Image (spheres, rainbow, N blue to C red):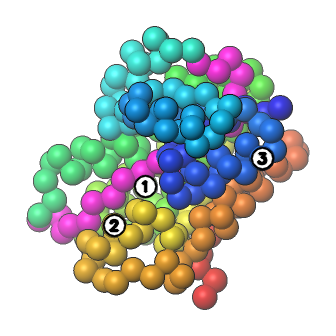
Amino acid sequence: MASHLITGAGSGIGAVLAARLAERGDELWLLARDARRAAELRERFPGAKTLVGDLADPAKLSWAFGHQQLPVELDSLLHVAGVVELAPVGELPVKAWQETLNVNLVAPAELTRLLLPSLRLVKGHVVFVNSGAGLRASADWSAYAASKHGLKALADSLRLEEHGNGVRVTSVYPGRTATAMQAKVHQQEGRAYDAGQWIEPESVAKAILAALDASRDAEITDITVRPGY
């Protein structure tokens, strides 16, 4: 039975991943920002274990985990959670930059650092759910794209550093996906939202599972998923 720690399991891609891995009989560790959210996740995913830590405050993750039981062995660490705030550079306040960078980049780096011992023990896998914005930036997307460009750099560096330890690293770059975040993006863009126009979270989850299931002689480093219509 494999063990997986997932951020962002409450909705979208993360929720689908948690459901699919639970169906396999794997052990789930789900990160929640507070105790109430943790209880909701345990109710939704019976048998799952939860950790409480706020990705918006990565400096406190080490302290928070010091008061909780962490997985001794971890087959995969799946970074799915993220935030987005669209605005021109001339109108984007420091608070929005800090929150975006903390949740989308600094917290994944810190979470990975804290869990690397558990990953190394079983030659585990780190998956970063990035974005098309991690490969190119558009107007009004500066903070989000910067955080995702940084996440690509984090993944690329980690892959080289941990290759000798047998830890695999994959970046996944989904296009627009039908999630609550996408609904928010459309609202910020002032456009009507039609989920049927975009990638299903299930499709992105399948790509992630394919990377996790790759035989040990292969490492799938980068996956780009685009709308098919």
Which residue is labeled 1 in the image?
Answer: 148
Residue 195: x %, y % from top left: 49, 77
* Residue at disc 3, secondary structure: helix
* Residue at disc 1, secondary structure: helix
Majority secondary structure of magenta residues: loop
* Residue at disc 2, secondary structure: helix
Asked whether residue 224 is in view, the answer is no
Circle nearer the N terminus (3, 1): 3
Instruction: Tell me how far mark 3 sits from mark 1, CA to CA.
Output: 30 Å
Residue at 31% in and 83% down: 191
Instruction: Tell me how far mark 3 sits from mark 2, CA to CA.
Output: 30 Å
20 or 54: nearer the viewer:
20
Mark 1 neighbour class, 10 Å CA radius: few under 14, some 14 to 19, many 20 or more: many
Give the amino acid type for the residue marked by disc 3 in the picture.
Glu
Which residue is labeled 3 in the image?
Answer: 23
Residue at 59% in and 64% down: 201
